[in-house]
Image (cartoon, rainbow, N blue to C red):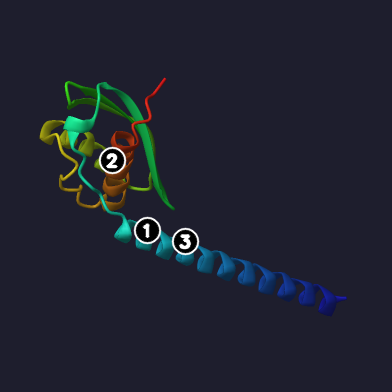
Amino acid sequence: MKDTKRMRRKFGLIVAIVIAAGMMVNCLYMLSRHRETVRTLTISNVDLNTVEDGTYRGSSEAILVAADVEVVVEDHRITEIKLIRHQNGRGKPAEVILEKVIEAQTLQVDGVTGATSSSKVILKAIETALKTGVESD
């Protein structure tokens, strides 16, 4: 009887270790995919002279980070950017990038140190909004 209990405990421990190892491998895989996605994410500038007045929506995603934005354009100038959704880990500091873009009137602004992934994803969402020209309701 004691041997059966001991065997069950050992089996349970082995199963728990295998599950934990699988979860760790999966996390490392997801992190690797995220880093590669962010590394290859390119931000192209948008010629604001070609963007009509309006409110545009865009989004971008890089496995662990996602952003949805609403960009308001008046007289070929970005006057407002609303961050509708920002799914991030420690990337909240990147949200200051919205003001940088409005101030510079370009997407070619420096990312926020320590929040590079979020910076790039937010910038890509803004680019998508301006390039696709999908007006918000």
- State the image coordinates of residue 96 (x, y, percent, origin top left): 21, 37
Left or right for 5, reference 69 = right
Q: What residue sits right under mark 1 in the picture?
A: 37
For the point 72% across and 69% down, which residue is it? 12
Give the image quarter of residue 14.
bottom right
Work out which residue is located at the far right of the displayed protein and give it.
Answer: 1
- State the image coordinates of residue 82 (x, y, percent, origin top left): 30, 27
Left or right for 64, reference 15 = left
Left or right for 131, reference 2 = left
- State the image coordinates of residue 74 (x, y, percent, origin top left): 20, 20
Q: What residue sits right under mark 2 in the picture?
A: 127
Give the image quarter of residue 127.
top left
Are the residues flagged by discs 2 and 1 in contact, CB closer than 8 Å?
A: no
Q: What residue sits right under mark 3 in the picture?
A: 30
For the point 78% across and 72% down, which residue is it? 8
Secondary element at image label 3: helix
The amino acid at mark 1 is: Thr
- Residue 67 visible: no
